[in-house]
Amino acid sequence: MPYDFEVSDVLPASPRAIYDAWMSSGGHSAMTGAPATVDPQVGGAFEAWDGYITGRTLLLEPGNRIVQSWRTTEFSDADEDSQIEVVLQPVDLATRATIRHTNVPDGHHSYEGGGWQEHYFDPMQGYFGPA
């Protein structure tokens, strides 16, 4: 049975800087430290972590919100795509980035159990600099 969860972190950058990096091939690659290709428009495909993650952009609110279909090479053919919603909220001189990850296949708890932190938030802290 698929499940949903939410994780967040405060990052030392503006919402627009995070949005722009997430939605560009060079920026996404640089902020995560892993190869990524991003078509920065609604309906555009993306690939991150050298092909481990793939999906399509479903909705964009520049500087505020990104919604994408999302799956990894660990999903079975029977698993539907999951979905991520990246919400960017200004907090003082930083941004609270919240990932709402829905329709995650049962048994795929590593994304919630540290995957987003280790592979996105931690590298983004280094990329954008100290808070």
Image (cartoon, rainbow, N blue to C red):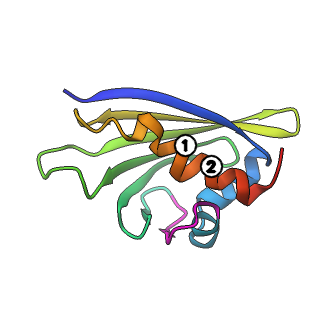
Identify the residue shown where x is 42% and y is 35%. 113
Hey, what amino acid is under mark 2? Asp
Q: Residue at x 22, y 32 (%)?
A: 106
Q: How far across and down, in percent of the image, does residue 38 sit?
A: 50, 67
Label 1: few (<14), some or many (≥20) within 10 Å?
Answer: some
Q: Secondary structure at mark 2?
A: helix
Task: Name above or below for residue 78 compared with residue 37.
Answer: above
Q: Residue at x 52, y 61 (%)?
A: 41
- What's the residue at 13%, 52% (across, down)? 77
Q: Is residue 91 above or below residue 131?
A: above
Q: 83 and 61: which one is in front? A: 83
Callouts 2 and 1 close, C-beta under 8 Å: yes
8 within the magenta span? no
Task: Indicate the quadrant containing the N terminus: top left, top right, bottom left or bottom right.
Answer: top left
Q: Secondary structure at mark 1?
A: helix
- Left/right of residue 9 with respect to residue 51 in the rendered view: right
Apparent side of residue 51 relative to residue 24 in the rendered image (left or right): left
Type of secondary structure dominating the magenta stretch? loop
Describe residue 44's horizontal placement relative to residue 80 as left or right: right
Instruction: Give the percent coordinates (x, y) of residue 61.
Output: 62, 44
Determine if the magenta segment contains residue 37. Answer: yes
Q: Which residues are magenta?
A: 31-41
Neighbor class of circle 2 (other Cα within 10 Å; few <14, some 14-19, many 20+) is some
- Residue underneath mark 1: 117
Relative image position of residue 92 (x, y in whole percent): 87, 32
Name the residue that disc number 2 marks: 122
Dot 2 or dot 1: first in sequence order is 1
Along the horizontal axis of the image, is 4 left or right of 36? Answer: left
